[in-house]
Amino acid sequence: RYRGHRCLNQLTVVDVARYFGRRKALSQVNFTCAAGEIVGLLGPNGAGKSTLLNILATLLSPSKGTITYGDRSAGDGADVRASIGMLGHDLFLYPELTARENLTFFGHLYGLPDVPRAVTHALDQSGLAARADDFVSSFSRGMRQRVALERALLHDPRLILLDEPFTGLDQASATALVARLRNRQEA
């Protein structure tokens, strides 16, 4: 169920490492970021950026180190995940559903109190209101990316994790994404 926002005013990563067998994906990652900050992870392919994002989203556990979300840890499970929005390489959309149906499905999963209103707002924000009832399978990669971003933002998360969010976006959509994130930052 939708739990509103828990205290997530700071993200702290201390000595996080992740191993896959003998292969080291991350080693001693340390940083802190406060609410409202936008932080970018830069590095070559295979540097561990996606691995770190998956750990921060609580989809993977670190092999070593600790992560705290305000006064909570990943061990707090659903309470922490309720405050995280994740857009990864896999967009987690159902192609056989419409954009509206996809967002409605996720709105119910999040336990939102007014799913139709939240979905309408998300479709307006994405610029896809006119295509709301078209199947996602008919969308370009950039359009699917925009729906997936709104899926990640639908429950108004305090921590937003974006893995290569500009993939498939044209210049106008990329500019709209930056504006959308700036609006969220100021809220």
Image (cartoon, rainbow, N blue to C red):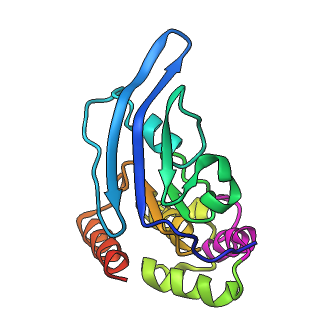
Residue placed furthest toward the front: 71
Left or right, residue 152 beside residue 109 = left
Q: Where does the image place residue 40, in percent across and percent down from the top left?
A: 27, 50
Residue sitting nearer the eye, 115 or 52: 52
Residue 119 x %, y %? 61, 82
Q: In the figure, residue 169 lies in which quadrant?
A: bottom left
- Would residue 19 appear left or right of 134 to someone viewing this image? left
Q: Main secondary structure of the magenta part?
A: helix
Quadrant showing the N terminus: bottom right
**Residue 133 drawn above or below residue 164:** below
* Nearest to the observer: residue 81 or residue 13: 13
What residue is shown at x 44% (from left), y 38% (from top)? 52
Q: Residue furthest top?
A: 22
Q: Residue at 39% of width from left, 31% of height from top? A: 48
Horizontal and vertical percent for residue 51? 46, 35
Please give left or right for residue 149 compared with residue 32 in the image: right
**Can you give x and y, in whole percent of width and height, for residue 2 in the image?**
70, 74
Give the residues in magenta: 93-111
Location of the C terminus (image quadrant): bottom left
Residue 106 magenta-highlighted: yes
Q: Say how many tags the image has.
A: 0
The answer to whether residue 92 is left or right of residue 48 is right
With respect to residue 36, does 17 lie above or below? above
Q: Nearer the viewer, residue 91 or 128?
A: 91
Residue 11 part of the magenta-drawn span: no
Identify the residue shown where x is 54% and y is 61%. Answer: 84
Residue 130 seen in the current view = no
